[in-house]
Amino acid sequence: MYAVGLSSLLLIAGGCAGDDGAAREDIYKESGNTINVQNREDMYNPNNADTNREKGEEFGYVRHQSSGIMGDTASYDDIGSIDREKVADTIGKIVLTVPNIQDVATLVTDEEVLMVYETDTQNRFETADQVKKSAMSVVPRYYHVYVTDDTSFLKEVENYAYIDSNTDNYEQLIDRTIQKIVKSAPQGRKMSDGENANGEQQGEMNARMNREGENKDNGLQQAENQTESNREGLSRTME
């Protein structure tokens, strides 16, 4: 009986060891410099998040390891990029929860957020501050946010949807719009002691305050023409 019991125990232990090895193979898959956690919802969140709200409540976790081989680095093709349209959509949905906001248009570039919103607020400054901070809560910290409740800017901001960061002189064109936007409406409170209301710091590489006065008319017309050409091309495609 002792021998039978010992044999059974060894079989169980062996089975557990085998299951543990199989489990590790299921959980971890080495791919280049990354250890991917497979079925991570099953592992870290046993209840499985089925809705966007539940997914938004979960933490994100990825572990990367150096391969130890010189020259064996992660490919830039594998590095994720920001889906700017989804970011714009997320910001717009959040801003619509701000009191007294009826309509909002959001443009997200490679380093700025431009927002035009319609409101019947009695306190433009406070509303601008809430709108701006809503956008700041979504984008990376190096972004700058510019807001206006002057709906005459709607068409101008919408026009930028027809160009991208490869468009010649696009920064000069957007800078000119930004300068008009910040003059048209309050921008809320300073983001910090070292930043202005738009999140810009003096001396920062992508700060508009450091580019003011540097933009010349040279190239602006070319960018405007390209914007118009892209818009007309899209209209013909939709027809």
Image (spheres, grey):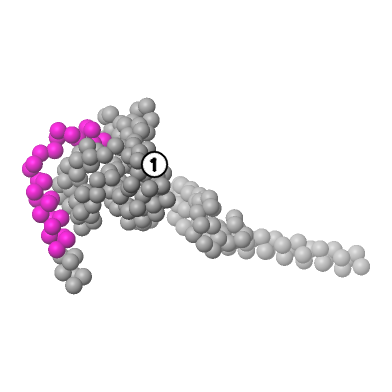
Q: Nearer the viewer, residue 165 or 2?
A: 165
* Magenta: main secondary structure: helix
Q: Is residue 48 left or right of residue 193?
A: right
Q: Is residue 39 left or right of residue 4?
A: left
**Residue 142 at what x, y percent from top left?**
34, 40
Residue 140 seen by the camera: no
111 vs 175, nearest the viewer: 175
Q: Position of residue 64 (x, y in %)?
A: 48, 49
Image quadrant in which you'd find residue 205: top left
| Amino acid at dot 1 | Gln
Task: Give the side of residue 196 with respect to residue 158, left or right.
Answer: right
**Does 67 sit above or below residue 193?**
below
Q: Position of residue 95 (x, y in %)?
A: 38, 49
Q: For this rendering, which residue is in front, 141 or 186?
A: 186
Q: Total number of numbered labels?
A: 1
Say if the magenta span includes residue 218.
yes
- Residue 16 in sight in this render: yes
Q: Tell me which segment is drawn in magenta.
A: 207-232
Placement of 84 over or under 183, stated as above or below: below
At horizontal 76% and vertical 61% (from top left) the residue drawn is 13
Asked which quadrant contains residue 149, the reply is top left
Label 1's element? Answer: helix
The question of residue 109 being in magenta is answered with no
Residue beneath the point at 8% across and 48% down: 221
Q: Residue at x 8, y 41 (%)?
A: 217
Residue at figure coordinates x 19%, y 65% from the top left: 234
Picture quarter with the N terminus: bottom right
Q: Position of residue 103 (x, y in %)?
A: 32, 53
Crowding at mark 1 (Cα within 10 Å: few <14, some 14-19, many 20+): some
Pointer 1 residue: 130
User: The C terminus appears in which quarter of the rendering?
Assistant: bottom left
Residue placed furthest toward the right: 1
